[in-house]
Image (tube, rainbow, N blue to C red):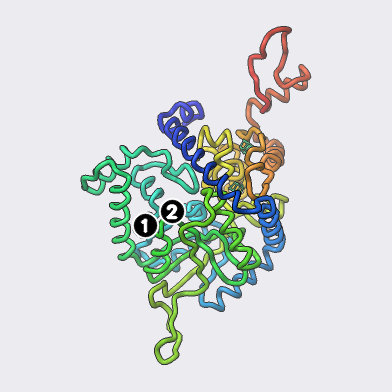
Amino acid sequence: MGIKEILSSKRTKTAKMVVALTFKTYLKNREKTFGEFNIEQLKLQLRKIKEESISNLENLKEKTIRNLKEKGIKVFEVRNSEEAKKVLFKIIGKDEVVVKAKSNTINEIGLDLFKGRNRVVETDCGDFIVQFCDEEAIHPVLPALHIPIEKIVKKINEKFKVRLEKSPEKITEWISEHLKKEILKADVGLTGANVISAEGAIFILENEGNISLISRIPKKHVIIAGIDKIVSSTQDAITICQASTIWGTGTSLPAYINVISSPSKTADIAGKEIFGLHGAKEVYLILLDNGRSEAIKNGFGELLYCINCGACLYFCPIYRQIFEKYGLNYFGGRGVGITTFINGIEVAFDRGLYFCTTCRACKENCPLDIDIPELMRKLRKEAVEKGLETEANKRMIENIAVDGNPFGKIEEGKIPKELYCC
Ligand code: SF4
Ligand code: SF4
């Protein structure tokens, strides 16, 4: 679908309306929560945590692996999505049922890999709705924001042969019962992670409670996380958890913070340590690079400071027009930036490298103060060197060369035909 069709589609119009409403609530909540913290000091602290961890990532990675292995977690380092898939297939037996939570990193690898091999059930309410409505997620925290309740009820009734009424309470109750049955039957829980402490703990935030269940009930819990999730200490990890919630939802804490530092265990019988009681017997962590080291090496380490709170999206004029079409798996300007290293600059070009207006609204609202517009400029420079340029950009350069300004020939008292800068 071209940009014009995207902009005029009913889906986009609904999404814009709902996002505008959610934005108001978000701002109200956030303003109240900001009042409870020294926000400027917290921002400086966050920046320092990420600067130190990204600049010392190799050492921290080694420390993380050592500490987690000592506690019984099996850790695998993978260079790319292909390697991640191979490791996943070694861990997850053919035909084992997988229950999964919302995770950008899992999306990054691609869930197609399970097709015809394993049954995978989404347990995040929003992602579950997106899946059975044959839709695409539009927001990292609220993926089904754009889907009207009428469509949700219709699809549930058709697909699951029930007769639900158009009530958010009834729909939630039905989804909860349905997913709980699936979780009880599952062999594997598959999740991402929000942050990992090199001291040996994995943090996963949630509001719904599905992650608590899928990380405990199935016998295996597999976590896939980018290496950029690692920070030096547990204290730093807690600070990031809190910031993710403040900037992500405007509240001070999520409903649950899961801290996983070993498989479930007991030594109650004859003093012998046995793994797997009420929680997962086997815990695996797959640490994914997928271009992240390359980003650091090429001077784009700042892209990895991102804690995926999604705050910038609320303020980005481009995201608020085309949503998930701006970026790939990770949305907005930062999403396009990291796509360059995960999927290549050609893909980043197709997913909006030239869409950014460099307005700086994202930077001003980012808890990490990530200079996305500047990073976009640097990436565009690389794109131009590789011959990836928009027609408008080429015309603008020609206009400057010929007429001395980006708009071309300007006639006294007339408005230029094209008003653009890139
Ligand atoms: S600078 Fe670019 S990515 Fe950031 S808010 Fe503006 S348009 Fe969006
Ligand atoms: S770039 Fe900043 S505001 Fe946007 S998701 Fe990342 S941390 Fe949050």
Ligand 2 within 8 Å, label 1 CB: no
Measured in 3D between alpha carbons, the distance from the residue under mark 2 to the one under mark 1, in whole angstroms, is 9 Å
Farthest bottom residue in view: 270
Q: Is residue 81 above or below residue 321?
A: below
Where residue 249 sits: x, y (%)? 51, 49
In front here: 422 or 150? 150
Please name the residue shown 52% across and 51% down the image.
Answer: 251
Q: Amino acid at mark 2?
A: Leu
On the rendering, which quadrant does ligand 1 occupy? top right
Where residue 20 sits: x, y (%)? 49, 35
Q: Is residue 392 above or below residue 102?
A: above
Res. 389 visible in picture: yes
Q: Secondary structure at mark 1?
A: strand
Tell me whether the residue at label 2 lies in contact with that at label 1, contact meaning CB atoms closer than 8 angstroms: yes
**Rendered image quadrant of residue 393:** top right
Res. 344 visible in picture: no
- Say few, some or many: other residues with alpha carbon within 10 Å of mark 2 (under 14 / 14 to 19 / 20 or more): few
Residue highlighted by disc 1: 120
Residue highlighted by disc 2: 111
**Rendered image quadrant of residue 225:** bottom right
Q: Amino acid at mark 1?
A: Val
Where residue 250 sits: x, y (%)? 53, 48
Q: Which is nearer the N-term, disc 2 or disc 1?
A: 2
